[in-house]
Amino acid sequence: MKARIASFAVAFIGVLVFKLLQLPLPWLLGPIFACLIAALVGVQMRGIKVLNDAMRTILGVAVGATFSSALLMSMGAMWPTLLMIPLMTGCIGLLGVLYFQRVWGYSFATSYYAAMPGGLQDMLVFGEEAGGNVRTLSLVHATRVMVIVVALPFLLTWAWDADLTNPPGAPAASIGLDQLALMVFCGLVGWQFAKRVGMFGATILGPLLLAATLSLMGVLQHRPPAEAIWAAQFFIGMGVGSKYVGVTMAEVRRDVSAALGFCVILLLLTVAFAETIHLAGLASPMETILAFAPGGQAELTVLALIVGADMAFVVAHHVLRIFVVILGAPLFARFFNANA
């Protein structure tokens, strides 16, 4: 209980500091930095998994509520950039394995699953089954998500003057109770149904699909209120920062340093692909960065919502990336290992 109270207290202090200093995305970046610093100095923190998962359903509903028939029709034109997702994933895997093996001396299993830009839990399960170092994998993926999420807001502001102060939704008081109840229904029912059928990313994709269906039918007419999305940011930020609890200085010197170097490779690849797509006239550079950046799906959904990006474009590419990694990672791992 004390660890959970400490998590909330530290994360809330982070929000207050970011607001006081007028830094971007206080509800997301504030908890990330505060919990990271607290973890590094030895503060014991622990989240509430069910509550964390429930908060992610808000993002699924928020994305699903943006769907319209016109938006759905536009998705057919995305195939040229969608085809580039497997290509980029392959480049990340190849460079990542070489980097972790040759530079840091990791085993093949650890290198491979550290390089794969999939969900943290999936990569830990696959990596452990393959004989990888679970602690190393956890730190590498936590660092990947944190660096991408922290770097992107500053890149968006610097390169495209993105306004990160936009409220992510309307105030709760301006939305009818029937619509708020419908959002809760989409979140809980969509999440639990997706979980039962074994859908990956169930906390986001289940609510997204149910909310999108009701939005296309004209039943759901609003996105979740700003207060709900701020709460989702808070819990996501707290979860990212808290993953460093128990980290030792030896692990910081080795695993976190290795992850930071890998993040440089990821950011360079993302910019290269985004620039190629932009020069080909296939999509705007800002939305391409958000769609191709190999960070966490929930965290990048938050950023896309705030800057007003094309949600269908961003989410479609992240879903395909996760799909490619989850289905392809074990198969390609056997192939590469057999030929190593």
Image (tube, rainbow, N blue to C red):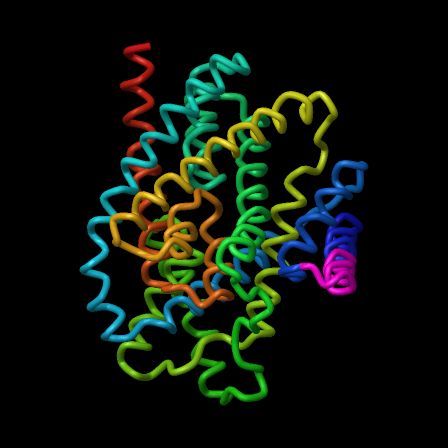
Above-or-below relation of 240 to 215 = above
Picture coordinates of residue 131, whole percent (x, y): 46, 19
Foreground pick, 18 / 63:
18
Q: Is residue 60 found inside the magenta-colored segment of the image? A: no
- Residue at the image position 64 percent from the left and 21 percent from the top: 254
Span colored in magenta: 12-23
**Residue 319 position within the rendered picture, expressed as x and y whole percent measured from the top left:** 34, 50
Question: Which of the image's four quarters has the C terminus?
Answer: top left
Q: Is residue 314 above or below residue 305?
A: above
**Would you place residue 113 above or below residue 105 in this image?**
below
| Up/down of 333 relative to 139, above or below | above
In this rendering, position of residue 236 left or right of residue 335: right
Q: Is residue 13 magenta?
A: yes
Labels in figure, total:
0
Q: Residue at x 43, y 38 (%)?
A: 122
Q: Position of residue 253 (x, y in %)?
A: 68, 22
Is 303 or 121 nearer to us in this picture? 303
Query: 233 or 291, which lies in front?
Result: 291
Residue situated furthest top in the rendering: 340
Left or right: 145 with respect to 2? left
Tell me which residue sits at (53%, 35%) in the image.
141
Q: Which SS does the magenta portion mostly show?
A: helix
Q: Residue at x 80, y 41 (%)?
A: 43
Q: Using residue 296 as the reference point, say whether residue 288 is left or right of it.
A: left
- Provide residue 133's location: percent of width, then percent of height: 54, 22
